[in-house]
Amino acid sequence: MFERPDDVVARVIQHLRRPVAIDPGLDARVLREIAQAPPTNRRGWPLWSALAAAAVLGAILIARPWSRDETNRSDLLQFVFVAPQAASVSLVGDFNDWDPARSPMQTAQGVWATAVRLAPGRYRYAFLVNGVDWRADPGAPTARDDEFGTASSVVTVGGRGS
Amino acid sequence: MGIERVESSDAELVRRVRAGDIGAYGALVSRYRDRLGRYAVHMIGDHEDAEEALQDSFVRAYRSLARCYDPARFGAWLYGIMVNRYRTTGARAARRHRIFVRDADALNGAAHGDQADRVEWTDAIERALARLAPEYREAFLLKHVEDLEYEAIAELTGAGVSALKMRVKRAREQLQLYLREAEHV
């Protein structure tokens, strides 16, 4: 017995609307590619001059609250860490119990990225490079109350600033 | 560098990108990657090609950001880049054939019952979509899967609203036909 034509199409639409898995490393690849050929602003300075300068130091972090989910008031934060020599990088923080297995970062030619959704609040975080090397964000506020004896950084979500 | 509180609107993020903030562009990529990726996968068929097209579209959008005259509608503008990207590179029929070989293997490897049915249904839909003319598939996906208004689709594609409605209608009819045929294979 056939379904009504509209039912068939409705099932097709429902099927096609399901999320499609996209490689999480795509974000990092895009950022890497655009950073390699930066446009110039009106004054002719490369827009990525600050980024390039920081890259010389070997590691860059860009962490930004990305998108506000109005349903649960959380922010999606994308963390990008440039470490061309690293074999692995994990994002660790008090939001994931400092567990490197919970937020491994994906790489594309040395640019590491991962996204984490966080509810409003103040969080400490760092990057664990090669499983042993603890790195704070050089451009973010440093946590003063770090009980681990290593540097970490602070991000505030949903507040007035960091 | 450092961390700032970021407003979540597309317009604000575009403004920050234009000011040189790579993180803000990362935010836009994150926001649209899944939706645009879904469209690319269904439109192109091959997952690897779709991700390549997606990445390329994001890069093109970044390099052309000065031409995004209404930053509040960045998402629609981005869809337009993807639509045009597909048209310029064309359908890759040969690669679509390879997908079906792979899916047939998956079907053979599927255990029993529901799992095999799901694989078969997915395969049938992919085959039916692939048989649609590109302009029919494009209109159907943008209207029914991406949930865009006809006026928005007309802006993206350059086709008139009445032509788009006809394409969507034909796409629906053909999908029904192809899927019914698949039931008898």
Image: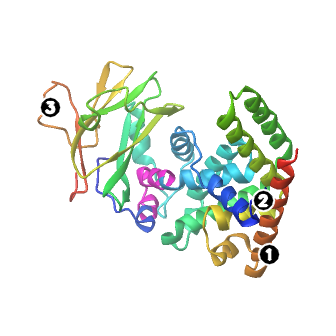
The residue lying at 60 percent from left, 67 percent from top is: B147
Q: Mark 2 points at which residue?
A: B87
Q: In which quarter of the image is the N terminus of chain A?
A: bottom right
Q: What residue type is labelled 3?
A: Asp
Main SS, magenta residues: helix
Residue range highlighted in magenta = B14-30
- Is any atom of residue B183 visible in this view? yes
Estimate how packed mark 1 is, as few (under 14), some (14 to 19) or many (20 or more) residues with alpha carbons within 10 Å: some
Above or below: residue A121 compared with residue B115? below
- Marks 3/1: CA–CA distance: 63 Å
Q: Mark 3 points at which residue?
A: A146
Q: Kindly identify the amino acid type of the residue bearing the numbered disc 1.
A: Met
| Residue depicted at x 69% and y 30% | B112
Residue A105 is labelled as: none
| Circle 1 chain | B
Camera-near label (3 vs 1) is 1
Q: In this view, does A23 lie to the left or right of B169?
A: left
Queried whether the magenta region covers residue B18, the answer comes back as yes
Residue A145 location in percent, x, y? 11, 35
Colour scheme used in the picture? rainbow
Asked which quadrant contains residue B108, the reply is: top right
Q: Helix, strand, or loop for circle 3?
A: loop
**Relative to B144, does residue B1 appear above or below in the rendering?**
above
Examine the image and state in which quarter residue B81 appears.
bottom right
**Which mark is drawn over residue B166?**
1
The residue closer to the viewer here, B161 or B140, is B140
Q: Position of residue A100 (x, y in %)?
A: 34, 26
Q: Of residues B123 and B133, which is closer to you in this image?
A: B123
- Circle 2: element type: helix
Asked whether the residues under marks 2 and 3 belong to the same chain, the reply is no
Image location of residue A87, percent across then percent down? 46, 21
Queried whether the magenta region covers residue A3, the answer comes back as no
